[in-house]
Amino acid sequence: MTVSIVAQLVVSGALIGLVYALIAYGFQLTFATSKSINFGQGELVMVSAFFSLTLITLGLPYWLVVPCGLLFGAGLGLFVERAAVRLALQQKSEGWILLTIILGLFFFSVAENVWGRDDRPFPTPISQTAIQILGVDVTPVELSVAVGVFAIMGLIEVFKRQTLLGKAFEAVSADPDAGELMGISATNTVMLSYALSGIVAAVAGILVSPITTVGPTMASALILKAFSVAVVAGLESGFGVVIVGIFLGALESVASFTLGSGWREVPGLLLLILALAVRPTGIFGKAIIRKV
Amino acid sequence: MWKRLLLIRGAELLMFAVLAAIPVAVQNPYALGLLTLLAIYGILLIGLDVTVGYLGQVNLGQAAFLGLGAYTAALCVTKLGSLMLVATLAAIAVCTILGALLALPALRLEGPQFALATLSFTALTVIVLNELEWLTSGAQGLSLTRPPILGHALTAREFYWLCVALFALVWVAMRNLLASQWGRAFEALRDSPIATDAMGVGTYRHKVAAFALGSALGGLAGALYAFNFQYLQPQSFTYELTVILLLGVVLGGRKSLWGAFVGASLVALLPNLLSNRFLFEVISAVGFALALFAGIRGLLRRTLGPFQAIAPIVATGILVVGGLLVTNTEDWRKAIFSLMLFSVVVGLPEGLMGFASKFLSKLFRIPEAPRPAPSPLDRALPARSVGTGGPLLELRDLKRYFGGVKAVDGVTTTVRAGEIHGLIGPNGSGKSTLVNVVSGLYTPTAGEMLLRGHPLPRGSLYKTAQDGVARTFQNLQLFTGMTAIENVMVALNGIYRRSRSLPLVLLGLGRGEEKRAEADALALLEFVGLGDQARTPAKDLTYGAQRFLEIARAIARKPEVLILDEPAAGLSHPDMLRQMEIIERVHQRGVTILIIEHHMDVISELCDTVTVLDGGKPIAEGPPDEVKRHPKVVEAYLGEVEVGSASAAPAAS
């Protein structure tokens, strides 16, 4: 195994890792406002990708499909919040874990029946021919993943810091009760976070599909890795997910090359269990002091 | 009494008798296969219910344990030529050990993190089973032949009876366990891990035991699964199965053996329900009608929120309409299952059996279990002799820092045996942190703590509780899902001997102790005036009663030192008087009390000595009247006071 092969594996793995980071970022958005995450987020990614694919096959130009796909993702996010999360939050229970799993199962079944069980290619106007950068082959499509991930994360962070609505979002994340007392509706903010998280899932789907193809099974494959990234980085850590995502993507691509493709997911899963055992709040998370 | 026993036990007996008798009447091998699967899933779901129902954690690992058990048994038979019994025991052992190992890291996790840890375990298991081809033949699958028992090859019907017999055994053993101190400890853990430790029960061993036990049952079910199908594939034990199992428990009803049975029936029979179109349409129509009826009734009587009423109607409505439109219902299996589950989780959070048991106990007028006569107080809370009132609890230069914040910064004080020692000070003066250090919630940064001259454990609620220090909590930490008497029974000290041993409990040998525990707990409830509310769930008690219950639970530890953290906070005046009277009576039993309180009249009335903290340091100590006039105390409470007006200040406090 030469250096150039390793470099190649690391780079292409890291670029996919950015997608895991993006999905994990979607978990952080909802965790911040409501301490809940969507266990069916992988299905959101998959369904949004299928939806966009349908628009493309209907003949819509790619650059029009993207905003439509994002809107669709936002809608799905809002639906998840309404159907699976709000009631559990009102009851202060962890029922949302079950309900989001159930919704995920529903989306999966719908996708299976509407779009079929096979993996399908996702056409893109971005070139698939590799170019060499510093001796490593990279396709513009892979690079578009990096650009897309950083663009959407950057936009959302700017939104949170610069707009009034974004500041309300931050306020509710810090303390929902105090936010309510200041006249910010916690429910609306949680809705906003789920809509954003749905947009993020749709972006992830549109970015990753040209590389991996679209199929119902992409949901579970992506979500496990996104969980690993979110937990290892910490559910409250902002950009920590990017570093962990890149690391995990690279690790996985090297493991898949050296141990065989079947073992591809093992490092991520082991990392997740280890991280949970050693540092449940994540590498970049803060330790929690127990209070009574 | 007899009616209750007859109805409840009778229903169980009848169920198992019917299960055992069906194959005599019905000779159809396909039906027999389904029934066998039902018994196996029954065992599996009872195991899953331990973590999901009693520990209250979302466990996504049960499919992995089913798979691990199945593969262990299959490999024992194919590679080692083991007997059926040996292979089954091996499957149970492997799953118990792996379950305990997984529980160790999962121990610190709650809610979503626990779900994630078990989810990744499932994914890992499937990958390993798939990839270790030299051992498991990977995706090709592993075939085995069911080994004979004592030279006799079991027929399908005999194997079914074996499964039903094991299901019945597991049922009885789990009933014994869940009705014991172990079952209560599991539930206590769910409601408040901190209070569980503080009551000397120990979260650690119970959480690991619960998880290992659930996994062991997964292993047993796995072995039976392997002997039943005689062919295994890793793909059978994926995320999808784990979700369906979890949903089976929830659908059937958590914390209920019957619920596990109903859930198992649904999981086993579901594919058949769906393949029969007519049956499916009938079921979905009935579901829709029920949801409509319950929803409208709930809305009219305002017992249900609009979402809880309407969402199940919509979900079952989609089922009915979808059933008419879709060509092949089996393709939509997951969607159908998820819609059914969604309606149940939202509309019937307690599951089918949780709902049915309420309904049935009303219908048959099943009386509550009778209450034993309370023990004499001398047994429940023996009077202690306090001797000459020498030093009991000594703190020397105790410190606790949080980063740069010196919450407790060098406290030295002595609590004498038999006194009520008050701890007061302005907000943020470090009172609560101090008692949290003494009771073991926080590890001290520096300093010494001595009880009877021996060092107290540092940073362990559980060990401190074992050493004879009990406490209550400022923000109530009751086991809210349990009744008042169960809250006290969890904490009882010095009663459970046999009940500590898991095998004895599974065999049902701890029942004598249960009776005594109930009697003692009742005596303590009467002591605080809650005797007639023994069977009320703690969350339904009034706020005042919850405060009294905290004290009853703490004195069930028969403590030498009782720490009360603001016992009168938020109480109405009559309740406060009652609380003071309870504290005084506890004191008369010879219990030494350390009390934090903001109400000065409570402190003046009760305390022999008062220590005043400010900025993490003691600034005065002595009898309440003296301390109140201490200039530093006046300053701490009221700010800088001019010389000459100090004598007027105490009146204002």
Image: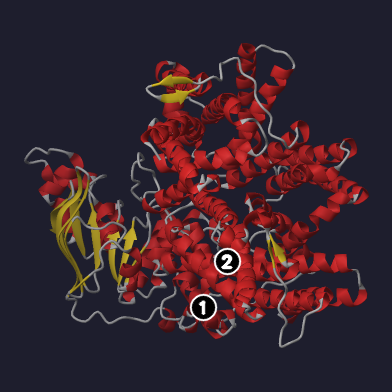
Picture coordinates of residue A105, whole percent (x, y): 68, 42
Picture coordinates of residue A275, whole percent (x, y): 40, 48
Residue B26 horizontal side relative to residue B603, left or right: right
Picture coordinates of residue B115, whole percent (x, y): 53, 50
Front-lying residue, B227 or B351? B227
> Can the viewer see residue B218 in this picture?
no
Query: What residue sits 52% from the left and 67% below the top?
Result: B212
The residue that label 1 is drawn on is B502
What's the mark number on residue B214?
A: 2
Front-lying residue, B450 or B390? B450
Q: CA distance from mark 2 to mark 1?
A: 13 Å
Above or below for B418 versus B133: below
Number of numbered markers: 2
Above or below for B82 versus A260: below
Query: What residue sits 60% from the left and 54% below the top?
Result: B130
Quarter of the image where one finds residue B299: top right
Q: Residues within 10 Å of mark 1 (few under 14, many from 20)?
A: some
Q: Residues within 10 Å of mark 2 (few under 14, many from 20)?
A: many
Type of amino acid under label 2: Gly
Q: Chain of mark 2?
A: B
Quarter of the image where one finds residue A104: top right
Q: Are marks 2 and 1 in contact (CB under 8 Å)?
A: no
Residue A109 horizontal side relative to residue A237, left or right: right
Direction front: furthest residue: A2
Quarter of the image where one finds residue B67: bottom right
Direction bottom: furthest residue: B150
Picture coordinates of residue B142, whole percent (x, y): 67, 63
Front-lying residue, B499 or B437? B499
Type of amino acid under label 1: Leu
